[in-house]
Image (cartoon, rainbow, N blue to C red):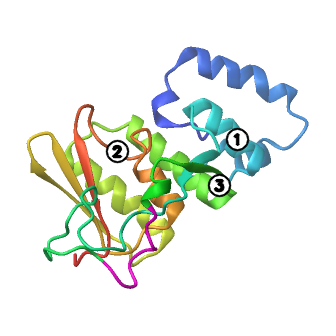
Amino acid sequence: MDKRYIQFSTAPKINQLMDNLLPLLTIDVLEFQNTYFDINTCNSSGLDNWGRILDFARVIQISIATDGVFGFDEDNYPIPETGYPQNFDNGFFYNPDYADETIPYSMNDYEYRAALKFRYLALTTNLSVQSINRIMNFLLQEFNSDYKCIVTQTATMQLTYKFNFSLTLWQLSLFRNRNILPVPAGVTTILLENQTI
């Protein structure tokens, strides 16, 4: 197999495993690469395998209280640059009675592939603000070519992620997960949606 991921290209055990696997394959090597091994093109079982490698399950927890955007000056929601909470057409009605309750949500292949790419790049970067910006914009472009994100350090040990669009509930759940969002250890994060970038 001539296409191997860069960080594994000199790993003798991985290369030995691949060399031992090739004679046992009952399908074409390129087909195996595309349907199982390549994270960009693999099918559901390949994605599930990547999930085991990257230690990230397909099922995530989504808050049933929604994101708390709709309302007037919620104490637990960051105030955007405009100085007032985001209200109409930016979220859902918020029910504080369900703030800590979640429901399981199984991501489809498109969503899971995106989550695994975020996880992979978060694990393989130096987590500087420059590299975080590069990762966020590179992967958000796969959702929509108009999506952008700017990450800035807004306080000591605090990063603010400004998105120029509304995050869906599954995206919001992902980005609140420190295993997905590229963020250095010990640094707090603020997510702001519908920002002018």
Label 3 or label 2, whichever comes before in sequence order: 3
Q: Which residue is mark 3?
A: 107
Q: Which residue is mark 1?
A: 48
User: Which quadrant of the view contains residue 41?
Assistant: bottom right
Q: Which residue is mark 2?
A: 182
Q: Nearer the viewer, mark 1 or mark 3?
A: 3
> Which dot marks residue 60?
none
Please identify the quadrant where the C terminus is shown: bottom left
Label 1 or label 3, whichever comes before in sequence order: 1
Q: Amino acid at mark 1?
A: Asp
The crowding category of the residue bearing disc 2, from other C-alpha atoms within 10 Å (few below 14, some 14 to 19, many at least 20), is many
Q: Position of residue 181 (x, y in %)?
A: 38, 47
Q: Is residue 90 magenta?
A: yes
The furthest residue to the left:
156
Q: Position of residue 196 (x, y in %)?
A: 22, 78
- 148 relative to 175 in the view: left or right: left
Tell me if I can see residue 78 in this picture.
yes
Q: CA distance from mark 1 to mark 3?
A: 11 Å
The magenta span reads 87-95
* Residue at horizontal 42 percent and vertical 74 percent from the top: 91
Q: Amino acid at mark 3?
A: Met
Q: Amino acid at mark 2?
A: Pro
Circles 3 and 2: CB distance less than 8 Å? Answer: no
